[in-house]
Structures are given as C-alpha cells and as structure tokens.
Amino acid sequence: MDGKDKFQIKDWATAPKEKVDDKKIKKQIKKDVKQLSEYQEQLYAENSRGLLIVFQAMDAAGKDSMIKNVLSGVNPQGASAASFKQPTSVDLDHDYLWRIHQETPKRGEIKIFNRSHYEDVLIARVHPEILTTENIPGITSVKDITPDFYKQRYEQIVNFEQYLTDTGFTVLKFFLHLSKDEQKNRFMRRIEIPEKNWKFSESDVKERQFWPDYQKAYEDAIQNTATKANPWYVIPSDDKWYSRLLVSEIINERVKALNLSYPVVDDARKSELQNILKLLQNEKE
C-alpha cells in the first residue's frame, strides 16, 4: 500500500485465499532466515546503511512470534528490538518522536519496532483523552483535538520516515491484519492453555469493544502515511505461518534491492595483509 489508492481496511483479506502447506512454508522461511543472516553480515560490514522494521497490529496478531521466527537468524551484535509502551514523564518532556528517534538503527544495524511511533496516531486516536496529559500546547481537553491535529501528525511521521530514508535507512512497515474472530480464538486459547495464561491480559479484552474505532484509526493512518518510498505492507495474519512467510519474503526482497557488498580492500591493505599472513605462517610453535 503506497498511498496512491484509497485504502479501505475491509477490502483487505485477513487469511490466505487457499489452504496453505505449513511444512513447505516452514522450509521456505528457514531458507529466508539464512539468506537474511547473510544480508545482515554485509549490512554490518558495509556500515553505511541501516534497516528499520516496524510491526503494528491489534493485540494477539502475532508480533512477538513474528519477530522470533522471521528474525531468528540475525546476529544480536547487529540487531535489536524496541517496544514502545506508555510514555514516561521524561518522554513527555520532549516531542512525541523524541523517544522514537533514540531507538532508530545505527548504520550497519537492523532495528525492530514492536509497536512504534504509530501508537501516537492509533491508541491516541481511539483514546484522545491521553493527549490531554501530554503537555501539548493548546490541548487541555478532548474538544481541543481537531482532525487537523492528526493530519499534522501524519505529515510529521511521513517527513520523519523520509528523513530516515534520505540518510540511508530503509523503513519497512508491516500491519499484521487480524480478524476479530481470530483474535477472540487466540484470547480463548491463552485462557484455556495453562502455558499461555501469562500472555493473557484483561485490558486486551476491554480494548475489543473499540474494535471499529481501531480499524478506522489504522485505515486512516495507513492511508495518510503510505508513500512510494515507504509503503505499508498489509499482511493477512489469521494464519501465523502464512503471515511469517510473506514478511520474510518482503524483507529479503527489499534488502536484496540495496545491493549490499563487503568493503573493498585496496592494494596497499592487501599487501599489508599478505605480509601479516607470512609472519603468521613462519611463526614458530
């Protein structure tokens, strides 16, 4: 989704059209994981570009397991994840993108955002009263929050991501599109299976009553922040393995397009290395 056409969330599937073969998918993901590991090594060695992967979704859509499976092969030395929860008092003393920018990748690094700066136009859209506590000039009540406020934030986010892109950082944005019925099934499994009880939160169920509001918030956010340079990938996520396959293929496709390579060693350095090699070869035991 690159913003050219009108985005209507109801028109996008949450499940594959045909039955999928999990065995084949897992085999392909394993290959993709290995390939991404090789790309990451080149990214790290080149040390001029970085990769930011953003995951947004409704609760229980599989963000954590997506990261665990698709990015299982990356070297922790050159990859890390960040999760953005309720802003701290320190965060609120700065602009809303301040804490985000601090977590963007370094050159040569892959950074994963499990939720992101989009929370400021998603949960804040559904629960606008949050904004009245953030010390924003001119906003002391919900009545002060106009459509222009969110329009401005969409523009700020687009400009922020374009700035990252212009300075060498690829931004990949994934919306894991889950159906309400499948979310219900996953919540029930978290209760029924003892090993999953720890994942269940009553607050998640309470947020289900705002499902239409969240769908509208995602629809508007994706429509207004999808660009040619930084499109949104809307991933059918009722089937976890199918969604993982799509994400792994997209990541590898986009990273491959960067044409990464290892640094070239000049003749002087090659000569120096050969001399060091000879010293090592002639070294006495």
Image (cartoon, rainbow, N blue to C red):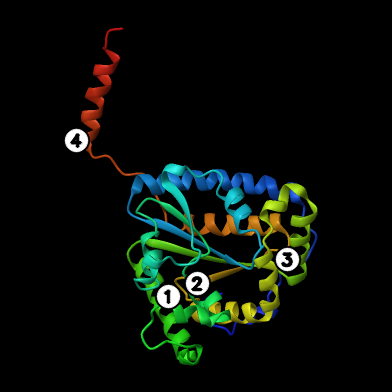
Q: Earlier in the sequence, mark 1 or mark 4?
A: 1
The residues bearing labels 4 and 2 have C-alpha atoms spaced at a distance of: 49 Å
Q: Residue lying furthest top in this view?
A: 285
The residues bearing labels 2 and 3 have C-alpha atoms spaced at a distance of: 21 Å
Where does residue 186 sit, x and y in percent of width and height?
A: 75, 60
264 on left or right of 268:
right
Residues marked 1 and 4 touching at CB (< 8 Å):
no
Crowding around mark 3 (Cα neighbors within 10 Å: few <14, some 14 to 19, many 20+) is: some
The kind of secondary structure element at disc 2 is: helix
Q: Earlier in the sequence, mark 4 or mark 3?
A: 3
The residue labelled by disc 3 is: 183
Residues marked 1 and 3 touching at CB (< 8 Å):
no
Quadrant the C terminus occupies: top left
Q: What residue do we see at 68% from left, 77% from top? A: 211
Residue type at the position of mark 3: Gln
Where does residue 168 sit, x and y in percent of width and height?
A: 35, 61
Query: Mark 4 or mark 3: which is in front?
Result: 3
Where does residue 230 sit, x and y in percent of width and height?
A: 47, 70
Residue type at the position of mark 4: Ala
Residues marked 2 and 1 touching at CB (< 8 Å):
yes
Q: What residue do we see at 59% from left, 77% from top? A: 218
The kind of secondary structure element at disc 4 is: helix
Q: What residue do we see at 62% from left, 82% from top? A: 216
244 or 59, which is in the foreground?
A: 59
The residue labelled by disc 1 is: 157
252 or 210, which is in the foreground?
A: 210
Residue type at the position of mark 1: Ile
Residues marked 2 and 3 touching at CB (< 8 Å):
no
Crowding around mark 1 (Cα neighbors within 10 Å: few <14, some 14 to 19, many 20+) is: some
The residues bearing labels 1 and 4 have C-alpha atoms spaced at a distance of: 46 Å
Q: Tell me the tag on residue 118.
A: 2
153 on left or right of 69:
left
